[in-house]
Image (cartoon, rainbow, N blue to C red):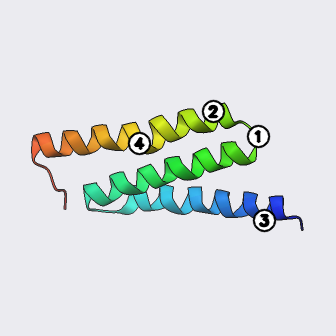
Amino acid sequence: MSLVTVLDILVVCGIVVSAVLACHLENLLSAVIALGVTGLFTAAAFLVMHAPDVAISEAAVGAALTPVVFIAALRKIGGKGK
């Protein structure tokens, strides 16, 4: 098994675990953070697939901008979740 295969497996496992956590966490802030981690793992997957331009876009939008917008919305409505 090559190093790239091991890295692919780790990245996919990270995506799956963080996405499942984002769906099952009851605290909304924790779910948003898990969603951001999912974006980071997705950016890493694109980087492993030799698509650095897509990885940079995913890191900017999926791991940075989207969680910031969600957190701002949570603060605006005053919701901490259950």
Amino acid identity at mark 4? Ala
Identify the residue under disc 4: 64
Nearer-N-terminus badge (3/4): 3
- Please report contact status of discs 1 and 4: CB closer than 8 Å, yes or no: no
The 10 Å Cα crowd at callout 3, few under 14, some 14 to 19, many 20 or more, is few
Q: Which mark is residue 35?
A: none
Identify the residue under disc 2: 54
Amino acid identity at mark 3? Val
Q: CA distance from mark 3 to mark 4?
A: 26 Å
Using the image as rendered, state which of residue 27 and residue 7 is in the foreground: 7
Residue 46: name its quadrant. top right
- Left or right for 34, reference 9: left
Location of residue 5 in the rendering, given as x and y in whole percent from the top left corner: 82, 60
Q: Which mark is residue 50?
A: 1
Indicate the quadrant containing the N terminus: top left, top right, bottom left or bottom right.
Answer: bottom right
| x 57%, y 58%: residue | 16
The 10 Å Cα crowd at callout 2, few under 14, some 14 to 19, many 20 or more, is some
Nearer-N-terminus badge (2/3): 3
SS assignment at label 3: helix
